[in-house]
Amino acid sequence: MTRRGLANVTLIRRCLPYLRPYRGSAALVVALFLLNGALVLLAPWPFKFLIDHSLGDRPPPPWLATWLGDEHFRVRLLYVCAAAEVLVILLNQVLLVWEKYVSTRLEQRLDRDFRSRLFAHAMELSLAYHDNHRSGMLIYLITNQGEALAQLLMSLPVVVKSVAMLVGMLVVLWTMHWSLALVSFGVIPGMFFASRYYATRMRDRIERTRELEGGALTVIHESLAMLRVIVAFGREGLEHRRYVDAAQRAMDARLGVTVRQTLFSLVVRLSTGIGRAVAWTFGGLLALAGRITVGDLTIVLSYIDQVYEPLETITYTYTGWQDQLVNLAASFRLLDTPPDIAEAPQPVVRERCAGEVEFRDVDFAYAGRADTLRGISFRARPGQVTAIVGPTGAGKTTLVSLIPRFYDAVRGSVLVDGRDVRDLGIEFLRRQVSVVLQDPALFSKTIRDNLRYGRLDASEEEIVAAARAANAHEFISRLPQGYDTVLGERGSRLSGGERQRICVARAFLKDAPILILDEPTSAIDSRTESVILDALDRLMEGRTTFMIAHRLSTVRRADWILVMDQGRLVEQGTHDQLLAADGLYRQLNDLQARQAERRAAARALKP
């Protein structure tokens, strides 16, 4: 077997465990397929008895003559054959409906389970993975390619049924006339080699087509995510052309695949058509020569007409597997990607941590960037407010991202309550940390749902209390639907300050002992900022807080200030100590003071 063949077998084997929860349904589907195939084999026999023994002069088998009696035998047999045919058709249709229901239910469950597994694994992967992979491709893989497992597994009973029908028809034809059987199956070798040739040549084309189709979906995803920027710069036409170009490349590739698939279908249909014509001709000559009865010829011609249907099914299923195997390979590549943030073999889980955080000689670097953080060491006591300041790109956000293990340190240790965060259970650790970001992240659900995201079992009273603490209850109550107001995409129906207050309320509701504030007021006007800062002051009470800020006026009340520059911790101390040290903090403070003076002077000059 070739290397690709072994890889395909491995992929199919990896699909089988997903069938285990539905073994009963899978067995029932196979049984229904086989019963249906048996009825297809049985369908021509009433015609044989009708032609040979009712319409023709051939003597009936003794058992049939005894059963129907001699009087009016031919008329009775006519009725029996008609009734038998109706019964076979009825049973066939009942089995088809039952088979369709069971197989569709099984396929949908397999499809749901596999897509769910892909989605869950994608969320388990670290932010570093998602930073380096396009979201549009992941969406395409889960939504478009995730169905491959269910389709492939559900095609297996079809192949089993087709093979069983082929074997059954071959046995009957061989019993009735072996030479006619050989003629009927003469096209099989040619179709086998044609299928192998198609599968070998099409795999790479299908993979390339999938990549291009995923690329087109990525353009849509990125454009919708950046729609405000696109509209602001008037670049709708540019993005439309970008999508059209990507879609055109995908369309051309898909057209090439479709043309080749159609040509292959033409070859298969032509081959089976030639096989039918030859078999009919040969069978007719045998009947004319008296070597086969007209009734037997009816069965033979019926089987020959039907024998190519399962043969075509097997051929098309085999070639269709190439699409599914390409999709499965991509899906399993995602599942084989190990999470960068791995759970400890025996994770430590507690009720609630005290909130002490310590960095010990921590280094970190993003892929393709060296020395994002270097030699970071400090300690934050429980309940301490630690401010983190420094120029843009100094590594402030990256630093706090190591606490809830959004990323893992390359060297050194991050400790919470004296335990390395890598030894703590990931879910437990992240329950101990609340984050309020610069960009308020909200779902397009109701305000109540967004607030309850902080704690899913929160009562209505707790939700309202959190909103009050965040200075959000008043504006929420003024909305026509109040807490039931459905927000737009990313909360677009609210102002920036209102969205941020909901995020603060969500952090209140979570009630975690460690709080990370990543410049939560940087994009808000001064009036709204005072309202949010008032809420944040209440939120920080009793919590170990890390507050990232560019405006140093917001960090003067911090218990401890960390000053970062180019990935290094260059200074740390209180506001007064850092001013006295006359270092980077003093430079940033003086610069912002001069800028504030200039703005004040400019306002004073306005009429």
Image: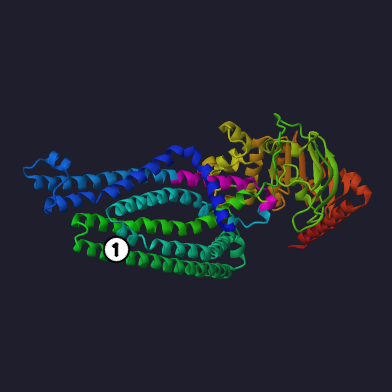
- Can residue 486 be spotted in the picture? no
Q: Quadrant of the N terminus?
A: bottom right
Quadrant location of the C terminus? Answer: bottom right
Instruction: Find the residue positioned furthest to the right.
Output: 581
How many residues crowd around disc 1 within 10 Å: few (fewer than 14), some, or many (20 or more)?
many
Location of residue 211 by image quarter: bottom right
| Front in this rendered view, residue 261 or 144 | 261
Q: Nearer the viewer, residue 549 or 325?
A: 325
Find residue 130 and report its horizontal and vertical position in percent.
66, 53
Q: Which amino acid, mark 1? A: Ala
Is 565 placed left or right of 538 in the picture?
right
Report the number of discs: 1
Q: Quadrant of residue 295?
A: bottom left
Horizontally, is 510 left or right of 537 in the view? left
Region in magenta: 107-129
Residue 424 in sight here: yes
Q: What residue lies at 49% left-to-right and 38% top-to-bottom?
A: 21
Q: Which residue is mark 1?
A: 279
**SS at badge 1:** helix
The structure's colour scheme is rainbow
Asked if the stretch drawn in magenta spans residue 128, the answer is yes
Q: For this view, does 404 lie left or right of residue 152?
A: right
Q: Residue 112: say if magenta.
A: yes
Instruction: Characterize the magenta stretch by its predominant secondary structure.
Output: helix
Residue 48 in the image: x percent, y percent? 20, 52
Q: Position of residue 28 (x, y in %)?
A: 39, 40
Q: Position of residue 343 (x, y in %)?
A: 69, 39
